[in-house]
Image: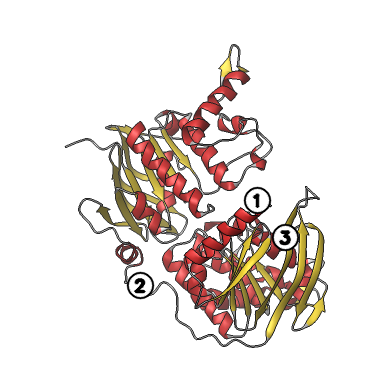
Amino acid sequence: MTIPLIEMKNITKTFPSVTALDDVSFSLQEKEIHALVGENGAGKSTLMNVLSGVYPYGSYIGDIVFNGNICKFNQLKDSERMGIVIIHQELAMVPYLTIAENMFLGNERIKGKGVIDWQKTYQDAEQYMEMIGLHESAHTLVKDIGVGKQQMVEIAKALAKNVKLLILDEPTSALNESDARHLLDLLLDFKKNRGISSIIISHKLDEVVYVADKITIIRDGMTIETLDRSVNEFTEPRIVTGMVGRKMEERYPHRTPAIQDIALEVENWDVYHPLYNDRKVVDDVSFHAHKGEVVGIAGLIGAGRTELCQSLFGKVYGTKISGVIKIKGEPVRLDTVSQAISAGIAYVTEDRKSDGLVLKDSVQRNITLASLEKIQERGVLNFDKECQVADEYVETLSIKTPSIDQFVENLSGGNQQKVLLAKWIYAQPDILLLDEPTRGIDVGSKYEIYCIIDKLAAEGKCICMVSSELPELLGMCDRVYVMCEGRIIGELQRSEATQEIIMDMILQASKRETNS
């Protein structure tokens, strides 16, 4: 019997009032791709943070055995010296440094007396970039490349550290379908041709089924089972059952739309880039949405979907913005976020951690943050009322938290998203702009978010929903607008929309743009 490359034996990790990992064991063979799946808060990222030394030896119970030797990692550098490299969900790129500078940050190419050898730095960077098919100049600033290419830079950076075990936490959460498939194919190539093992954490079960040799399911901080491709059935329903502890007959809740009058109309909307004033990012966009309707906005990354939503929400993005917004048939002027909120518009950002929530503040404060005037009495916050409101939303939205005093950063991604939704629902908007509302959360939590969206639509709210996951749009939306290169290129009813039709519309529009 071969010795595993890595063994984690009886790992227990606790935080104040929470047991994140409860006697978890995990093993990985050489030249193996092993997926970790589970609901948000199950303990997947915590387990990998233990393995990589983010949580140092002594802060957990149990043993890590690498190549037959017990390891006592006290920091990331310790695990990296052994060839274990972790790439976190939030990429750690420095935007105003070049690709090469980012690639060797902390792992500098040195010549004599601590001086950086810049020639070797850029030569080595180009070499590793060539290995993974990243065709950019190593002198390019990271801010000037997209998220997909930044993910490739992180992988090249790992290769430069002589990686033996690559750990990727939600590596495709911000990637479009083609970029995601390229990354997964890279992992398969690394396994076959370089002998590199990988551990991948992902909520995208189709990707897990595509790439993994084994799948370990974690639920409530405990190992439920490990599936082996050579022995077990690798299907999404089978994995979901292990993750949530029950069968999920449907991915999307069934509802009968009760569509009413038009709530939002946007006419001839133009938005220019805030830094490059001659670059139009939203180009003559017109669309409408009704009360009680869920309208989807589909498109590849860079199509202008987020820029459209942000510019409508009090012009928080863009310059030289022009066009007309009508709410309930009346033109409105929305030059600030306050004006947008007063007009009954809410925007649920795609980046809840940076733009949507105050992570180092409590659940209760985050829920009331957009509507403080509702809990004020003569200019003073009513703490008791704030607690009452928070308790109500925690119960109504099934937010899993030890208390409403808990800092939001300590919640799982799915529960953070529910807090963000609670903040805007409490503001009582008529129109909700939802930008990637289920990004980075598990299938069980997604279903709960979908139910919340359906409930809001049933109450007569107007929902505009951006998503990079076409099945999500097709499963949730009554109509779908398709965007490409900042323009709306088509509108599809739910009954006629398919993934193939949407992608064909985008490809044809891209060809026309290239040939024009």
| 277 relative position to 435: left or right | right
Q: CA distance from mark 3 to mark 2?
A: 39 Å
Residue named by callout 2:
248
| Label 2 residue SS | loop
Amino acid bearing label 2: Met
Front in this rendered view, residue 355 or 180 = 180
Label whose residue precedes the other's in the sequence (2 or 1): 2
Give how far across and how far down residue 57 sits, in percent: 41, 38
Front in this rendered view, residue 108 or 130 = 130
| Label 3 residue SS | strand
Q: Are marks 3 and 1 in contact (CB under 8 Å)?
A: no
Amino acid bearing label 1: Asn
Image quadrant assignment for residue 248: bottom left
Residue named by callout 3:
282
| Label 1 residue SS | helix
Comparing labels 3 and 2, the label whose residue is closer to the camera: 3
Give how far across and how far down residue 150 sits, in percent: 57, 42
Amino acid bearing label 3: Val
Q: How many marks?
A: 3
